[in-house]
Amino acid sequence: MTNTTIPPGDAHPYLRAATAGIRHHTRQSARTLGHADRVHLDVLHSHLTGLHLLMDQLAETTRPPHPAAGRHIAAAHLRLWQAATSLHEAFHALPATESSTDAGCRPDRLPEGPPVLTICQRQLASGHAIRRKTTPADHGPRPARTA
């Protein structure tokens, strides 16, 4: 049995608890699930998008004092988004169950859509954050070149 109490000086107790929860789930799902279902992928997508947001914040604060470390964190940030995108695609590739009749993303229904679309909402928000960080801003018309 592992010790699950958090040391008094621990600066990151919730991250450690989330990691422990994922480890426990990994052990349990190997024995009981056998395959991924839509609920499983939705919860994993939620974890990845949460990590994505955290890595975004860490990259921004780390980059100025430690540029090399900041670049590595930014690369991890991008890869988390790619992993979340793959989970989102896998979610929609699995057959819908009786309780989730949605077969695909419907952005026109998104803020008030059924609960199954929360994965689509998270994916759209993550994609927007990535594009905002990685796409150059339009700074207006460029001046004409003179010879």
Image: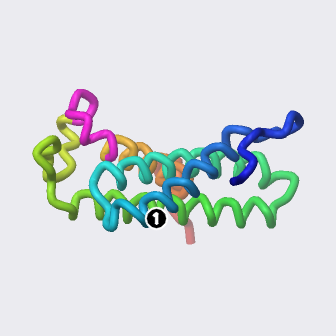
**Residue 143 seen in the figure:** no
Task: Give coordinates of residue 85: x percent, y percent.
Answer: 39, 60
Q: How many marks?
A: 1
Residue that appears at 87% across and 53% down = 65
Q: Where residue 113 appears, x then y in whole percent? A: 21, 33
Could you tell me the amino acid type at mark 1?
A: Gln
Is 6 positioned to the left or the right of 31 in the image?
right
Q: Quadrant of the N terminus?
A: bottom right
Q: Is residue 114 left or right of residue 39?
A: left
Answer few, some or many: residues within 10 Å of disc 1's Cα (few below 14, many 20 plus, some between 14 and 19). Answer: some
**Image position, residue 57 (x, y; %):** 67, 44
Where is residue 72 shown, x and y percent of the image? 71, 66
Q: Which residue is mark 1?
A: 82
Q: Is residue 36 visible?
A: yes
Colour convention: rainbow
Residue at screen point 33% across, 46% down: 119
Identify the residue shown where x is 73% and y is 39%.
13
Say which element carries label 1.
Answer: helix
Extreme-top residue of the structure: 112
Q: Is residue 53 positioned above or below 86 on the image?
A: above
Q: Is residue 117 magenta?
A: yes
As drawn, 41 above or below 35:
above
Question: Quarter of the image holding residue 90?
Answer: bottom left
Viewer-closest of 111 and 4 = 4
Q: Which residues are magenta?
A: 110-119
Q: Residue at left 28%, top 57%?
A: 37
- Quadrant placement of the C terminus: bottom right
In the image shown, does 111 or 27 lie closer to the viewer?
27
